[in-house]
Image (cartoon, helix red, strand yellow):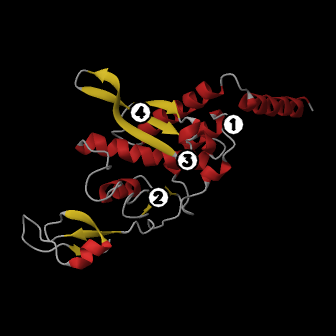
Amino acid sequence: MQSCANSLLHKRCEVMNRRRIYDRGSRGVQALEAAWTELQHIVKGLPNVVFVSLSATNRGRRGHFARSSWHYLKTRGAHELAINPGLFEFAEEVLSTMLHEAAHALLNERSGNPGVGHSRYYHTKDFRDCCLELGLQCSFRNTRYGFCDTDWQGKEIPDRYLPVLKILKRDLPMGTARAAHARPVRSRRLPDPGRCRLVCPCDRVIYLGKKSADAGPVLCGLCGQPFNPREE
């Protein structure tokens, strides 16, 4: 009986701690920091980062990675990483989002580019391959964001991440009342903006209004060949 009473008391204390308000933000960051430290033991080459909380105005995002955004060394800054507190009650979703941002951090360490903003996509094929290496599913969303939709998608979470998952389930406080953020984003194409994306044989890209594109061929000044539509 005494053991049952202690167990109930312990569970009640856990619930009260998760609901505690005054230090919830700092405890959320501490839990993410502890989980990241454990993740560094599992994923070799994962750098140190500075965790921050996403503000209410940015909570349409699951997380974000900003490279070299904190003072660190004269020639190098520390990276910033944030996780949406709307995910805090879904430890599996927090973990998948952390691994998404970890892929950016790894690519930056390996090649000096986090897989964002170069080539023709926001998230490149290199980023996709790094996510697959980390055990995530990664799918193409559209021609603006590229391979940015990452999730477990029914896969079992690899055993190597179970210690990280344990920390998140144990230490994360209750987050914001935005449970919809835990739903995976499905791939979709951008709405037609009224412009055509044209590519020449040397892979230069231009965007033209449909009327201008239909008026006649546009030639590349480097290869001398016309720009034509190309499906992704």
Q: Earlier in the sequence, mark 1 or mark 4?
A: 4
Above-or-below relation of 208 to 174: below
Q: Earlier in the sequence, mark 3 or mark 1?
A: 3
Can I make out residue 131 in this image?
yes
- Figure quadrant of residue 15: top right
Q: Is residue 72 left or right of residue 50?
A: left
Q: Position of residue 193 (x, y in %)?
A: 40, 65
Q: Where the N terminus falls, by quadrant?
A: top right
Dot 3 falls on a residue whose secondary structure is loop
Asked whether the residues under the numbered discs 1 and 4 touch, taking CB atoms below 8 Å apart as contact, a structural biologist would say no
The residue that disc 3 covers is 60
On residue 93, the disc is: none
Q: Where the C terminus falls, by quadrant?
A: bottom left
Q: What residue is drawn where x is 38% and y is 68%?
A: 194
Q: How far is mark 4 from mark 3, CA to CA?
A: 18 Å
The residue that disc 4 covers is 80
